[in-house]
């Protein structure tokens, strides 16, 4: 796939904006995947069984493979992967520092919540781009199987120890709050969200942002309900 | 590849011993790879640059892919992967607990030393098995590219900060000592090494073990020399 095929040919300023938009989107995704890989693989060691260790390790490795896929896209754009990721490092690191799982169950819940919310967020942003980029982001963020696997394990864990329910429900609320704060900060800092509403008047921009976050919250609530937890 | 093709058909006791031998070999390799994956990926986060984080992440993921390849072999033998790994968990965990890297440089050196020594160890053990198993172990432990990459980065690091030399040389000696102790313990505990010399008289067995460890130490010294360090 050539650079031309992922960035629609357009002349001048518009083309430059679109290119920067793509670089930002891939940059934040790349750093998000790389750091998720490191966090999940570190947590894998504390899994209750060897089977879980292998399963969580596989989740972490999938995140790394996504990182490599996004990094390949940046390289195709002729962009240094490190430079593209660097602007997003402070806010993503801060997110992880504020959401350190206390144990393996919280780590699994963190994977479930953040993969869900961020997946929706990136897919929504990609929706403002051409079909080909949308398909690419969808392929990279395609994690239905992964989310189903985590959901199944969480349901089992909650059935085995019902006392976990209130703790994990509380943790889920904290996680979604932090994830949405992170998404908003990324939008403000890098103009990704405002770029998304580019060309629209300021009132409409605010409304569109509100609608997006309402949708992300709604999808999150549905996923929590799937586990039998109150969002 | 069928089970029959990896375990040569042989009747009775000899076949049972060979089967247990293979299960032990794959079990120790599987747990070794899984735990190496977790340790290296945790350490990746402390890499000095984003480029190093991605490179060390790739090393960790390669270990996980090796784990998956060995686990697939165990499944082909009709063996539960968890049960095959379990006997080796205490000694491998103890090895990691005794060799916690103080920083990223020590983590990189640990990868270099242990991948080298354990690779030689497994290849030697596989040498007592049929051609097909040997090829399989060689393919899984094939890490020339990985070792070269680590060596190149270590050389660069040592050139940038020559004061690291004595610390990393000391660390390398401690690592090889612990790795050889671990290899010996595995041999004693699971009869892998003695199985290797099966059918030979006790004097010859002791001599063969000594020769093996002398060879492992010699190869390690060569790898340390490659870095310009004294083993």
Image (cartoon, coloured by chain):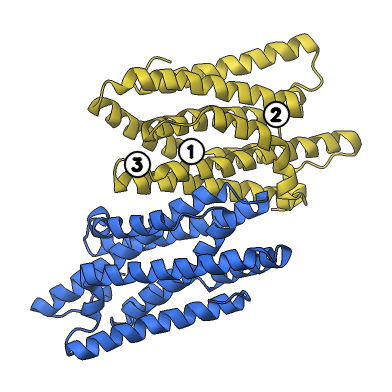
Chain colours: A yellow, B blue
Give the label on residue A47, or none: 3
Give the label on residue B47, or none: none
Eyeballing the image, is B221 above or below A26?
below
Question: Does label 2 lie on the same chain as label 3?
Answer: yes
Image side of residue A13 versus residue A40, left or right = right
| Chain holding disc 2 | A
Q: Residue furthest top?
A: A203
- Say which of B82 and A26 sits in front: B82
Question: Does label 2 lie on the same chain as label 1?
Answer: yes
Give the label on residue A128, or none: 2
At x 39%, y 54%, the residue is B97
Mark before the other along the chain sequence, 3 or 2:
3
| Chain holding disc 1 | A
Quadrant in which residue B149 is drawn:
bottom right
- The residue under label 1 is A143
Quadrant in which residue A118 is drawn:
top right
């Amino acid at each position: 796939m050539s650079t031309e095929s992922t960035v629609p040919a357009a002349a001048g300023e518009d083309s430059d904006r679109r290119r920067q938009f793509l670089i930002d989107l891939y940059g934040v995704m790349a750093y998000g995947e790389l750091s998720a890989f490191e966090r999940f693989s570190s947590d894998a060691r504390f899994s209750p069984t060897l089977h879980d260790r292998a399963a969580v390790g596989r989740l972490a490795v999938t995140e790394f493979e996504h990182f490599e896929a996004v990094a390949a896209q940046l390289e195709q754009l002729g962009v240094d992967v490190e430079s593209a990721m660097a602007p997003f490092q402070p806010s993503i690191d801060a997110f992880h520092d504020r959401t350190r799982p206390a144990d393996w169950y919280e780590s699994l819940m963190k994977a479930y919540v953040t993969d869900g919310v961020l997946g929706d967020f990136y897919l929504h942003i990609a929706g403002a781009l051409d079909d080909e980029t949308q398909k690419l982001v969808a392929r990279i963020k395609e994690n239905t199987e992964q989310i189903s696997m985590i959901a199944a394990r969480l349901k089992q864990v909650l059935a085995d120890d019902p006392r976990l329910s209130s703790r994990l429900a509380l943790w889920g609320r904290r996680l979604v709050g932090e994830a949405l704060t992170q998404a908003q900060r990324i939008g403000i800092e890098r103009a990704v969200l405002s770029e998304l509403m580019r060309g629209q008047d300021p009132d409409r921009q605010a409304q569109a942002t509100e609608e997006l976050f309402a949708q992300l919250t709604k999808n999150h609530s549905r996923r929590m309900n799937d586990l039998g937890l109150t969002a």
